[in-house]
Image (cartoon, rainbow, N blue to C red):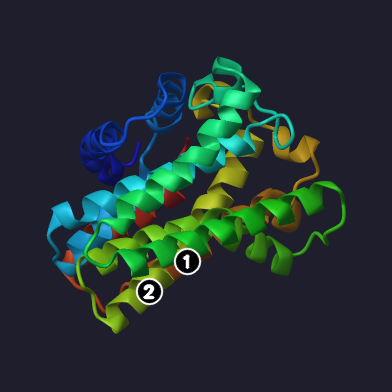
Amino acid sequence: MSTVLQAHRDACDALLTRALGERSCEPELAAAIGYAVLAPGKRLRPALVRLANQCIGGELQDADAPAAAVEMIHAFSLVHDDLPALDNDDLRRGRPTLHRHTDEATAILAGDAMPMLAMKLLAHTSNGPAMCNVLAEATLRMIEGQMMDMAAEREALAIDEQNLRALQAGKTGALLVAAVELGALSAKASTPQIEALTAWANHLGQLFQLTDDLLDATASSETMGKRTGKDEGKSKLTGVRVYGLAGLRDRIQTCRQDALDALQMFGPEAADLRLLTQEMADRSH
């Protein structure tokens, strides 16, 4: 795991546990939500909230609610993405997917509940309306990206770079950008600071998805903690199909440099963001 993410993971797990404990739910539903939200993972999105807050020099506790909220949205997306009607996956983060751990109906309802819990968390922050708007818009863009993914599987979408970038900007990038913007808002960042950080996050989103495409084609299921090789079998629109393996590796390096260039206005306060960029390009799982 990235050393940058590792430094934030325990704190992210703690704030997620605390956030889930603040709202009581029907016991079976609460258990399902907890299974999904607290599943072992990198905690990339809540860490990005914290990292953006730190880069601006904010109070880290102000990042707690948006960090928990963005991870709940991410968990909801994974639960629904794994369902039989979509990707029909049995394994997520090295464990049975939620619909296999419980049942399909429970997984659907747990996924439905997570965005509501996320918005309630943000509603109680000092700039709740702005944060709710950012996260709601990102969630809609993420869902639109999933629709593009389905269209590609049905061969109703051209396999080209333009469509690939649009799909990735929604399916993966939107929530990463929202995490960074929420962290910047929690630290009362200036408009130029927010613009620079969101530009970095856009490039990071591309970098993350392209490395994911590469690993799906080259890594084992044991290494990744989920089924690999599925994208090619489903004719998905991926970096491998658009660029080929060699071209994809070149594109990853371009994204790495674009992300680093976006941080030029910052000094040492962005050191962790630069390191994360490097580690993301080099990741093996």
Crowding near the residue tagged with mark 1, few <14, some 14–19, many ≥20 C-alpha atoms within 10 Å: many
- 220 above or below 123? above
Residue occupying the point 20% across, 38% down: 11
Looking at the image, residue 165 sits to the left or right of residue 115; the answer is right
Q: Quadrant of the N terminus?
A: top left
Looking at the image, residue 203 sits to the left or right of residue 249; the answer is left
* Type of the residue with mark 2: Ala
Residue occupying the point 33% across, 41% down: 2
Residue 83's quadrant in the figure?
top right
- Nearest the camera: 248 or 92? 92
Q: CA distance from mark 1 to mark 2?
A: 10 Å
Residue occupying the point 44% across, 57% down: 176
Q: Does the image show residue 81?
A: yes
**In what element is the residue under mark 2?**
helix
Identify the mark nearer the N-term, 1 or 2: 1
Q: Which residue is mark 2?
A: 262
Q: Which residue is mark 1?
A: 202
Looking at the image, residue 149 sits to the left or right of residue 133; the answer is right
- 53 above or below 238? below
Residue 251, percent from left and from top: 58, 61
Residue 277's quadrant in the figure?
bottom left
Total marks in image: 2
* Type of the residue with mark 1: Asn
Q: Could you tell me if the residues under marks 1 and 2 are in contact, i.e. CB atoms within 8 Å?
A: yes
Q: Does the image show residue 46?
A: no
